[in-house]
Image (spheres, grey):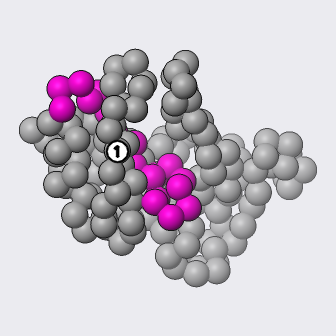
């Protein structure tokens, strides 16, 4: 069984970079210039921003289902992001370099399992969680700040 990591869609965020600070603030978003790498992980490119690069930090509903696990949190998006499209079973370096929290959800968007893993060992946890026939999809979060990183589906 394989797995597919999915980044967020660039077209859903491109408009943010045309907004002034007041409009961003009205959306609960803020513009930043990356001042270190790593530190500003983009959910579209699945890469860290380079120092000097413009990013927007915004609230994002990563678990929109009508369930007790409905959730949102902050994400960064790079202005110059290229859409990430990892190959089947490919793990981007962004995930490899961090401690991750991986959560398994069933078809009703209820969490059925979760664990923490060093990103260098992500595949083994993904396969273990997806071996559960009740697992419909996984969400990956950066364990220390708790922010949503990406979704994983079985292939």
Label 1's element? strand
Q: Which residue, as the protein is rendered here, is positioned at the far left?
A: 1
- In magenta, the rendered stretch is 132-149
| Quadrant into which the N terminus falls | top left
Decide if residue 45 is on the left or right side of residue 126.
right
Is residue 9 placed above or below 58 in the rendered structure? above
Q: Is residue 123 visible?
A: yes
Picture coordinates of residue 67, whole percent (x, y): 52, 21
Q: Residues within 10 Å of mark 1 (few under 14, many from 20)?
A: some
Residue 99's spot in the image, x, y percent?
Answer: 39, 66
Looking at the rendered image, the quarter that the C terminus falls into is top left
Residue 98: % across, % down: 39, 68
- Residue 105 lies in quadrant: top left
Which residue is at 57% across, 36% downward? 71
Q: Is residue 23 left or right of residue 66?
A: right
Q: Percent from the top left, x then y, of residue 74?
A: 63, 51
**Residue 108: in magenta span:** no
Q: In this figure, which residue is indicated by the disc labeled 1?
A: 114
For image coordinates 63% across by 74% down, the residue present is 34
147 in the magenta segment: yes
| Vertical placement of residue 40 versus 28, above or below | below
Residue 66 in which image quadrant: top right
Q: Is residue 12 above or below residue 33?
A: above
Image vertical order of residue 101 relative to residue 121, above or below? above
Count of numbered tags? 1
- Let me know if residue 80 appears in the view: no
In the rendered view, does 7 fall on the left or right side of 106?
right
Q: Is residue 74 left or right of residue 102?
A: right
Residue at point 32%, 38% (across, down): 113
């Amino acid at each position: 069984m394989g797995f597919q990591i999915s980044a967020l869609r660039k077209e859903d965020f491109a408009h943010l970079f045309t907004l002034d600070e007041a409009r961003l603030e009205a959306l609960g978003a803020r513009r930043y210039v990356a001042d270190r790498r790593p530190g500003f992980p983009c959910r579209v490119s699945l890469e860290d921003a380079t120092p000097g690069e413009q990013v927007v930090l915004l609230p994002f509903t990563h678990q929109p289902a009508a369930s007790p696990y409905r959730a949102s949190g902050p994400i960064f998006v790079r202005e110059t992001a290229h859409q990430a499209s990892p190959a089947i079973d490919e793990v981007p370096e962004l995930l490899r370099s961090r401690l991750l929290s991986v959560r398994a959800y069933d078809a009703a968007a209820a969490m059925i399992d979760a664990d923490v893993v060093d990103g260098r060992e992500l595949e083994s946890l993904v396969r273990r969680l997806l071996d559960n026939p009740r697992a419909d999809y996984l969400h990956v979060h950066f364990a220390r700040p708790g922010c949503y990183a990406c979704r994983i589906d079985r292939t």
